[in-house]
Amino acid sequence: MRSIFLFIVFCVSSFCVVGQSLVSATLNGSRTKAQITSLFSLNLVRNGAKFYKITYTSKDAKGQPDTLSGLMVIPDDLKFTYPTLVYQHGTSDCKRCVPSSFGTQGGEEGQLGLLFAGLGYVSVLPDYVGMGDGRGFQTYVHDATTVSATEDMMKAVKEWTAQNGVVTNDQLFITGYSQGGYASMSYHQHVQNTSGAAAVTAAAHLSGPYSLSGVMRDLILGETAYNYPAYVPNTILGFNEVYNIYNDLSEFFKPEYVDDIKSYYNGTLSLFNMNARLAQKLIANTGASVGGRLIKDDVMADIRNNPNHKVNQILKENDLFRWKPESPTRIFYCKADDQVPYLNSVVARDSMYARGASNTLLQVADINSNANHSTCFTPALTNTLLFFLSFQRITTSTQDGIITDLMTVYPNPTSDYISLKGDVEVNQVIIWDLDGNQRINSPYSNDVISTKDLESGTYIVTLINDTGVISNQKLLIQK
């Protein structure tokens, strides 16, 4: 996160930098506060946002210099000092289906950067190694390259913000969903190991495959029908970029499936189309969509019976549960997840607690027992946003020093009531619990608001006036 002096050369539609890691930053658009609020139907947005495609120097799967890409989204009100939030995206359908493509087909997940920036974060969304502008094939669920792509993008963003009047504080928030849940945990562990626990303000890892050598291996080696067999070749293809598991696909996969897998690897078939083809062929050939049946019988037998098989060693090397978070952390999952088994989160929880993780700092929760992988996303993200807001610190400089908000909730902590003090008119007060429920939604006219019906705990207070949300503040209720 070091800032260095850069010589800036302005180019057509972007500026290019001769420096350590930043190559270019291209402004691709902006959204107003009202547009972001409407897009997400969420009364928490405090400002508009601008979004940029970032390219930066990093390394490819072979450790060779490469140019990677990602999305940076910044709040449009630069008089404040903001925290940084890293969001790691989920599994992509194609090489260009990444955050930096936001605004074009395939970049839809990048819109989450708008939400985070609208809530007051400088938002960093890497595309990953082998995705977006990176060469080669993506290194899917590979720990080391996940870290390198993210860390180098963070450096590039710091370089750009230092030169463009965007001031960030020392707060860092990390989250991601699905593959992104794996990637967020990967980066969280790295930052803690290299910079200490205090370097991560809070993290939330959502429905990720943290137990590759256990839960995910058991799923593939078993005979349980699985509607997403494409995750098997996607994982093996990615690991082969790093570890050279095979020289030709036919050495690992059965011949009747090789052409579809090759087409996906070459970019002429999307992941989801490959999945549909493979599932259909597995059912026709074997009677069920069992992902492990894509693998040649002799290879599968060797993986099952030889603990030292290269695949088993790779999976174990890239597990992410053998550590303990030392900053506020949430692991959210849904028990009915049909793509990433919820036991990944349970294994991580049990391993981390066994290593001495604090049950105050680390909490693991099934947030909707009936939600599948797709429907789990919204409650997981909502819980994450409110969890992060309980730690967020946004400040602005004045002649008298640093202030955090123009309106302050008091008393705080409280038991029976709150009121407000400050110089900005407030018309409405919303109090949220950290599960995303609106517990109080009340007009305000210089009076008190009763909190007698709220249980002891942490809440978020949203203050609204005629221009919209002006502040989100943490409130402690103590009975």
Image (spheres, rainbow, N blue to C red):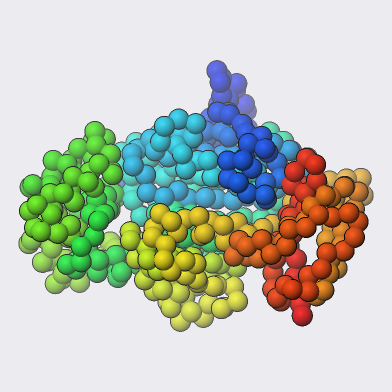
Quarter of the figure with the C terminus: bottom right
With respect to residue 213, does 62 lie above or below? above
Q: Looking at the image, which residue is at 7% across and 47% down?
A: 255
Q: Which residue is drawn at 73% across and 62% down?
A: 440
* Residue 196 seen by the camera: no
Residue 290 location (% of width, % of height): 18, 60
* 153 shown above or below 181: above
Query: In terms of depth relative to the viewer, which is nearer, 247 or 378?
Result: 378
Q: Which residue is drawn at 30% across and 70% down?
A: 214
- Along the horizontal axis of the image, is 421 left or right of 296? right
On screen, residue 475 versus residue 85, left or right, reads right
Q: How far from the left and from the top, in percent, is residue 266?
A: 23, 36
Query: Looking at the image, is 132 positioned above or below residue 248?
Result: above
Please give left or right for residue 341 compared with residue 184 in the image. left
Q: Which residue is drawn at 54% across and 73% down?
A: 363
Residue 8, position as x, y percentages in the image? 62, 26
Do we see residue 262 in this rendering?
yes
Total marks in image: 0
x, y (%) of residue 133? Answer: 40, 34
